[in-house]
């Protein structure tokens, strides 16, 4: 899928664009597991090694984890990134950070890069409400993306359920901020309107009919869009906007927000209908889902302390320039809205084996995940961090010395090696994009080895 003469897929565009949003701000301690500093002139490896804070165990009581939780909790919202959507250790670190932040830093909202309905199921379990399910079964039954059906998520839910059971006055909520369930969201919002105004619901429902069929409701969001035409999509989006207005007028704010998610999902994938033309896709178009996710995160978290659990490319806190000017990751919107009240944690690896759908599978709804392996390459950010620490460690870049060397590093393109739901089975040159880290995140983490997610 391309939008300019030089071929660039949606995935690679997002990877490349969000990558510029990388690395910025903090205060740190030197770890004993960092690479010994060489004598002579400093290098970026030695400057970063001096900032490394070791994490001995991926547990909430580990001193390195507790220090990292304290660091990122200074902001009202923290973006918790991951280098892949299918690895274990980076997800586990996010889980134990959440536990430490709940216990010690008043965290009250966990925002997932996932849809409304599935996260409501997870939240109901975490609330402590009566259930006959174990955490693993609750996760397996929830309507969430396959990448979230892991032991880490199940263990986190079980922990949150225990916390909420004895801390009713400090309950932690689990909320989805994505917008890839327009059929479900439109149907639920329409049903809410029908209760109070069946006539208006009938009128709006006629325009929504193509996305409310049994086949449409059963299909994955991107595949549902392949079942309708551009004209039907536009009509359905307009109807969802009208539905939102009607529900707001009636004072049904939650249902109105559900209608908003429905039109967001239709707008974010405008050019991906049965007769859509991705050659019309612009950086603004590629940014829509990210912008909607950020808007939803702020609206749903309100003024409470929150974390945003997502991929590196979504949580990254800056926007690119140059060839990718115009693309806006969710983190950049959050940074603009919240300023210093948004912190970003980016995770990297020296070696990784992770689950992903091979790009050769195309968009098959039944495409299986496979294990894919990668090693940090020269001239990449993960390669640099792996050289700076041979053990799991985090780097708070606020105390990185402001020198000619560090200023040049910020301006010089460096490779970013991140993987989402899909990946090529063998390394390809297009996996790594070269961009300068001139818009930086707050904290970086290096894992010497990522292993596959423990799927349920």
Image (cartoon, rainbow, N blue to C red):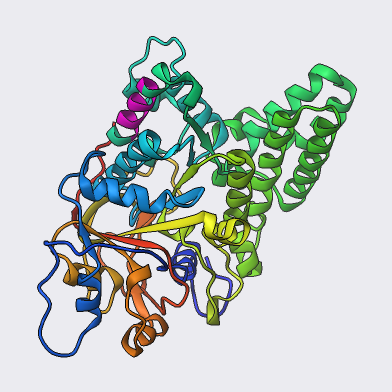
Magenta span: chief secondary structure: helix
Left or right, 375 with reference to 119: left
Magenta stretch: includes residue 64: no
Please identify the residue farthest to the right as the structure is shown.
Answer: 199
Q: Is residue 431 visible?
A: no
* In the foreground, 88 or 227: 88
- Residue found 55% across the figure and 62% down from its top: 332
Instruction: List x then y, in percent, for residue 97.
Output: 33, 43
Residue 143 position within the rendered picture, expressed as x and y whole percent measured from the top left? 48, 30
Report the number of discs. 0
Q: Is residue 452 left or right of residue 226?
A: left
The picture quadrant where one finds residue 349 is bottom left
Can I make out residue 210 in this image? yes
Give the quarter of the image for residue 211. top right
In the depicted structure, whether residue 11 falls above or below residue 122:
below
Return the residue nearer the eye: 381 or 354: 381
Please say whether residue 154 is one of the residues in the magenta stretch.
yes
Which is nearer the eye, 162 or 12? 162
Q: Residue at image x 37%, y 37%?
A: 104
Q: Quadrant of residue 241?
A: top right
Residue 337 higher or lower than 220, as above or below: below
Percent of width and height locating residue 8: 48, 71
Q: Could you tell me residue 406's position as x and y percent? A: 34, 83
Give the camera-side residue of 299 and 132.
299
Residue depicted at x 32% and y 24%: 136
Q: Name the residue at 49% across, 75% down.
A: 7
Rendered-image quadrant of the C terminus: top left
Q: Which residues are magenta?
A: 153-162
């Amino acid at each position: 899928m391309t939008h300019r003469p030089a071929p660039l897929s949606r995935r690679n565009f997002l990877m490349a664009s969000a990558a510029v949003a990388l690395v910025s701000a903090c205060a740190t301690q030197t770890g004993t597991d960092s690479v010994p500093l060489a004598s002579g002139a400093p290098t970026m490896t030695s400057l970063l090694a001096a900032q490394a804070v070791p994490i001995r165990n991926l547990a909430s009581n580990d001193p390195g984890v507790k220090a990292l939780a304290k660091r990122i909790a200074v902001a009202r919202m923290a973006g918790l990134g991951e280098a892949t959507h299918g690895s274990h250790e980076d997800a586990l670190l996010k889980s134990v950070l959440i536990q430490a932040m709940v216990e010690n830093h008043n965290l009250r909202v966990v925002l997932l890069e996932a849809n409304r309905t599935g996260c409501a199921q997870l939240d109901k379990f975490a609330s402590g409400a009566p259930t006959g399910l174990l955490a693993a079964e609750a996760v397996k039954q929830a309507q969430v993306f396959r990448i979230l059906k892991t032991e880490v998520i199940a263990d986190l839910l079980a922990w949150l359920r225990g916390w909420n059971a004895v801390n009713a006055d400090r309950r932690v909520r689990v909320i989805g901020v994505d917008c890839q369930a327009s059929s479900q969201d439109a149907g639920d919002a329409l049903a809410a309107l029908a209760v109070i105004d069946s006539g208006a619901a009938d009128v709006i429902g006629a325009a929504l009919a193509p996305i409310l069929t049994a086949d449409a409701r059963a299909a994955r969001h991107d595949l549902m869009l392949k079942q309708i035409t551009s004209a039907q999509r536009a009509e359905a989006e307009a109807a969802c906007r009208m539905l939102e207005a009607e529900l707001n007028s009636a004072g049904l704010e939650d249902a109105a927000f559900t209608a908003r998610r429905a039109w967001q999902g239709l707008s974010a994938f405008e050019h991906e209908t049965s007769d859509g033309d991705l050659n019309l896709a612009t950086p603004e178009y590629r940014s829509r889902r990210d912008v909607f996710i950020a808007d939803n995160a702020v609206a749903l978290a309100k003024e409470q302390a929150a974390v945003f659990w997502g991929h590196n490319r979504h949580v990254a806190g800056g926007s690119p320039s140059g060839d990718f000017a115009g693309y806006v990751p969710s983190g950049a919107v959050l940074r603009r809205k919240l300023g210093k009240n948004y912190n970003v944690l980016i995770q990297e690896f020296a070696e990784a084996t992770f689950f992903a759908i091979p790009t050769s599978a195309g968009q098959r709804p039944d495409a299986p995940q496979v294990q894919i392996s990668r090693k940090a390459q020269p001239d990449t950010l993960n390669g640099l961090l792996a050289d700076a620490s041979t053990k799991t460690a985090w780097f708070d870049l606020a105390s990185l010395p402001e020198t000619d060397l560090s200023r040049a590093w910020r301006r010089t393109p460096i490779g970013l090696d991140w993987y989402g739901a899909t990946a090529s089975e063998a390394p390809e040159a297009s996996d790594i994009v070269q961009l300068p880290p001139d818009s930086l995140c707050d904290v970086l983490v290096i894992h010497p080895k990522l292993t596959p997610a423990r799927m349920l």
